[in-house]
Amino acid sequence: MLIKCLRMQGGGPYPAARVTDITLELNRPTGQWGIERREMHVPNTYGELTPCGGGDTIPLFKRKMTIGRRSNCDVILNFPNVSSYHCELELLNGYWFIKDLGSSNGIKVNGTRYESRYLMPNDTVSIAKHQYQINYTAVGDAPVQEEENPFSRSLMDLAGLERPRRPQPAAKSATPSAAKPKPPQPKHRPEDDDAMKYLNDLG
């Protein structure tokens, strides 16, 4: 008879770094239990994304993770409005940093659209229209956010409602039409004046 159980251990801000596999085996003739312990190491988790509408949490098991619809992304979100490579999460100096990878529907942090942003614990992250709360233990001093000029973007863009404009085709340069050559003017001759004087005298 075998009984197996797992005991997870960890420490510091990123728990679950070690797992102990314990096996209990009953020796029927003697009625005694034998205990076997085996240590297993599993990847650290650096936090998790919790869906705001309910569902399974997404563990952040790497310090740099891509999120998108492609099968080779670290976090796969198989939704039509999520781009193939939508955004990237990176743990920088103890804080998670999110960066848009040129997605169609963008990312938001606490309701405001950004190209990139440091995430504080319990911030709400929107990937397209899918909202998650990021839960982790920050380490060190809070980073300084790169604030942008609020007047450089429209209110629609800040709210994530403005679609990127398509580039307009370059206007064709108007080529000046070739000037038509003037007809050659007859050269003035002195004998022409004498002929005109003679005709005037006849009249």
Image (spheres, rainbow, N blue to C red):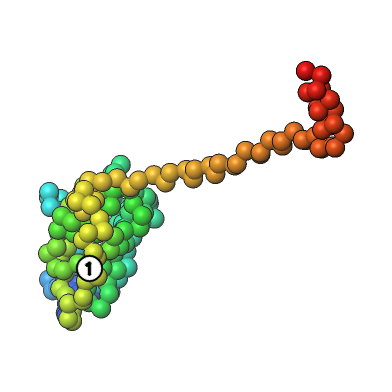
Q: Is residue 73 above or below residue 61?
A: above
Res 106 seen here: yes
Q: Please indicate whether residue 55 sits to the left or right of residue 106 in the image.
A: left
Q: Please indicate whether residue 28 sits to the left or right of residue 90 in the image.
A: left
Position in image of residue 26 (x %, y %) = 16, 68
SS for callout 1: loop
Q: Is residue 38 above or below residue 157?
A: below
Q: Which image quadrant is residue 177 in?
A: top right
- Quadrant holding the C terminus: top right
Kindly identify the amino acid type of the residue bearing the numbered disc 1. Glu
- Quadrant holding the N terminus: bottom left
What residue sits 43% from the left and 44% below the top? 168
Query: How many numbered marks does the figure carry?
Result: 1
Count residues near mark 1 (Cα–Cα under 10 Å), then give few for <14, some for 14-19, many for 20+: few
What residue sits 16% from the left and 68% below the top? 120
The one nearer the camera, 122 or 176, is: 176
Residue holding disc 1:
147
